[in-house]
Image (cartoon, rainbow, N blue to C red):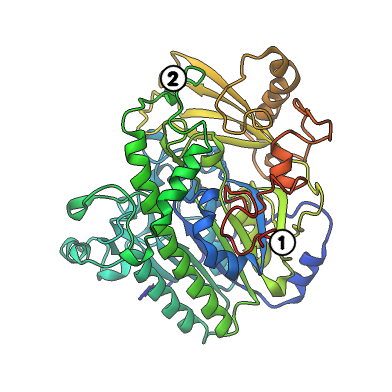
Amino acid sequence: MFRAVAVVGLAASLLVAAPVIGTATTTQSAAAAVEKPNVVVFLLDDAAVADSRYLTGVRRALGSEGLRFSRAIAPNPLCCPARAQLVTGQHSHNNGVLTNNGAYGGIVSMVEPDNTIGAWMHDAGYQTSYAGKYVNGYPLNTDLFGPDGIPTGWDHWDASIRGATNYWHFSTFTDCPTVDDTACHDAAYAERRYTTTVEKTKTLALIDELHQDDAPFFLFTSWTAPHKDDLGPYGTDKYPKAPKRYRRASDAKDFERLIASKPSFDEPDMSDKSPDLRRSRANIAQNAKPNYLGRAAALRAADEAITEIVDHLKEIGEFDNTLVVFTSDNGFLNGEHRLLYKKWEFEESLRVPLILSWPDGGIPVGITDRSATLVDLPATILAAAGATSQRSSLDGVSLLDSEPTTVRSHQPAPQLIGSGREKARPEDRAWAYQGVRWGPYTWTRHWSRGDAWTQEQFYDLGDDPFQVRSRASNPWYRKNIILTMKQYYADLKACAGAEQCVLPERKPIRARDPDKDGLWSFYERTVYGTDPRDRDTDGDGFRDGKDRDPLDPDRH
């Protein structure tokens, strides 16, 4: 069970309302008319958009009741900085967390680590709960949060203590009387139990408890799946884990079909990439397949657990007035560009699944091409709850006024992306790379640890959907597109607040349009669905009618 704690809210000396850009909409009017909603956040760990094919239950339970964002990204696609963005509502350069560890990473790098969304929601009258992996570095630095080791504002706290990414061996805050009870946590860690099942059981029990209270609840559940396994003393290999009943023989065929369609898998020529992206081809194929199979099984287990929780909310009458947020901290590269990781500026790493559902709040059902990032989610939650941030600024905007896409509803907005240098020393350059993603274009600048070299990367998804060829030195791109993107980068790299950090939607210059239909040759057909043969409405990596998703509108 979750541990209930006494909480004292932060002094509201700096109150920043969650900004909503644009005019009032039906959704905002409906939200204002209902009582405060419950809020439930389901956060997967390393789930790429293509992994949605293994989340059929979530897509039935939430996708058929809410709005799916086809352009959602993680601006800093790495575990720790992404989680810091989700609890602060700020970009990495403002909250201080650029990477997982080293001089510029981990929870010790966070500016005001005890001033996060848990405190803001508590002060707004919510019963608050956090379970699972928190910002990397917790619990090693619990002294940041007072004698009990609990960040301010969380009424029910069950963060991971040992084995945060171990599927069968772990301990959580509620397993032991205190966070520093070593013998107790050793014993809990030695016990064999499946993390997804444990989190599901605890979450269901807590919902039943909080359902009896008049106060609304805010539940943030961070799942292990489909992150690689943390070996520890009891592990057998690094691949994600799940009970046998979640494995399927067809997963191997999915893997073979996927890599056959991607020239970026185990990419033969990496000479166009910056030095920090060049990896050996050794063991990529050997490791990618078992990793993929483990991910598929772990995702099915998480899918079943989340679906059961959503169904329970419906059974007890809480679902309609609950804002449910389903997403991942980042995507994942499973062999593309010789990488078995996230962090980098490739689409598989940047893009994340995102569904918002709140029937009573007027969130519509469908799919939207509106630009969205993880930084927007705290602003969205605060707007729904009528809560305020106590940080100096919020860098995102509320997504509550989003509407389903009809035909080209939105032009893309330029978005800041980048990630810090892991295991950096204080004298090292903090950023590994930074840049901008704008519609079909991605431009970044990479730096070496000590500034011995710098190199730009540029990809045009319209001409190169798998990002195999960097066009950073192409004269036409440099003059017509890269120059503009560098200006966007200059505007965004030190932005503070939504007014600076959320640039207006802008129509990119089209570089390739061979059929003269006014659409990019690849990008707009797949996103906007103007050509049924190429449509991938759910963004799972399979064309509609070619996958097994029961929600595909063209499935016969």
Quadrant showing the C terminus = bottom right
**Which kind of residue does numbered mark 2 sit on?**
Pro
Residue highlighted by disc 2: 275
Q: Residue at x 24, y 50 (%)?
A: 231
Q: Residue at x 43, y 73 (%)?
A: 203
The reply to whether callout 2 and callout 1 are in contact (CB within 8 Å) is no
Instruction: Judge left or right: residue 347 versus residue 415.
Output: left
Quadrant showing the N terminus = bottom left
Frontmost residue, 534 versus 235: 534
Q: Residues within 10 Å of mark 2 (few under 14, many from 20)?
A: some
Residue 341 spot, x, y in % from top left: 41, 39
Residue 59 spot, x, y in % from top left: 58, 64
Where disc 2 sits, the SS reads helix
**Which kind of residue does numbered mark 1 sit on?**
Gly
Residue that protrudes farthest toward the front in the picture: 556
Instruction: Judge left or right: residue 273 versus residue 537.
Output: left
Instruction: Judge left or right: residue 285 versus residue 434.
Output: left
Frontmost residue, 78 versus 533: 533
Residue highlighted by disc 1: 366
Q: Measure the alpha-carbon separation of dots 2 and 1.
A: 42 Å
Numbered disc in front, either 2 or 1: 1
Q: Residue at x 27, y 61 (%)?
A: 170
Residue 481 spot, x, y in % from top left: 72, 23
Q: Is tag 2's residue or tag 1's residue first in the polypeptide sequence?
A: 2
Query: Which quadrant of the structure image shows residue 146?
Result: bottom left
Q: Is residue 98 visible?
A: yes
